[in-house]
Image: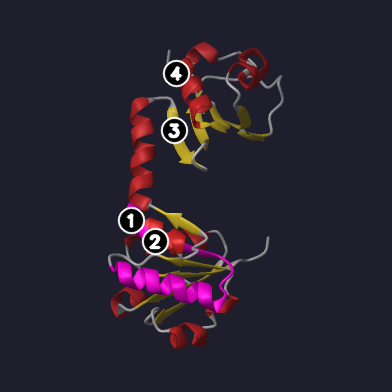
Amino acid sequence: MKRTQYAVIGLGRFGSSLARELTKLGHEVLGIDQDEEAVDEMSEVLTHVVVADSTDEEVLRSLGIRNFDCVIVAIGSDIQSSILTAILLKDIGVPLVVTKALSELHGKVLNKIGVDRVIFPERDMGIRVAHQLVSPNLLDFIELSRDYTIAELSVPKRMSGRTLKDLNLRVKYGCSVVAINKKEGVIIAPTANDLLEERDILVIIGTNSQIESFENEVVK
């Protein structure tokens, strides 16, 4: 697998967590922050770290930021710096700019200036937790877009011993099972004859309403 080069600007709680995980996944990560202490904390974790002002175009160019495959702007509370940094990155020619939004309005501005992806860590986590609270069988919930969702659902006892063909999810609900996580391993692209057991985890993709309909069926 190609080692993608990432740069993470802003090494606060979100940025440092993201940078650590990217490093664990085997990618090269450059960490950038104006706070020397934050940079020192990540110096032995990331591929490279540097104390720098990301709102200075010359500084960004000197770091060779244009050569990175993806740059994530994870600046904590300074909306002005976040927006200016994103503008500079797009102007310099970074292929993929992902920016953390601090509010809906901030997100709208980022979209207006052409950021490739805007993320709302606190809001998105809140949505996932809400779904998990409402449906005990729902283990994880990721909104792929405004309309599509991928969800992990635990197989209840009453569905144990049935096959995917028996459940007939595609016809009844319109959603698809893309994987089954079993004790002995994960089945990717399962067949209609794959047997389900209690506590297996179904990975399902579909529209939000399709997933919701199936959730309601599961928890009956």
Residue at image location 39% in from the left, 74% down from the top: 84
Whichever of labels 3 and 1 marks the residue nearer the N terminus, that label is 1
Circles 4 and 1, Cβ within 8 Å, touching? The answer is: no
Whichever of labels 4 and 1 marks the residue nearer the N terminus, that label is 1
Circles 3 and 4, Cβ within 8 Å, touching? The answer is: no
Residue at image location 38% in from the left, 25% down from the top: 136
Depth check, front residue: 87 or 125: 87
- Where are the magenta residues, as a range? 78-106
Tag of residue 216 = 4
Give the CA distance from mark 3 to mark 4: 14 Å
Residue 14 image position (x, y, % from top left): 36, 59
Tag of residue 139 = 3
Mark 4: which amino acid?
Asn
Depth check, front residue: 171 or 105: 105
Tag of residue 109 = 2
Name the residue beneath numbered marker 1. Answer: 105
Mark 1: secondary structure? helix
Give the CA distance from mark 3 to mark 1: 30 Å
Mark 2: which amino acid?
Val
Mark 3: which amino acid?
Leu
Circles 1 and 2, Cβ within 8 Å, touching? The answer is: yes
Whichever of labels 4 and 2 marks the residue nearer the N terminus, that label is 2
Q: Quadrant of the C terminus?
A: top left
1 within the magenta span: no
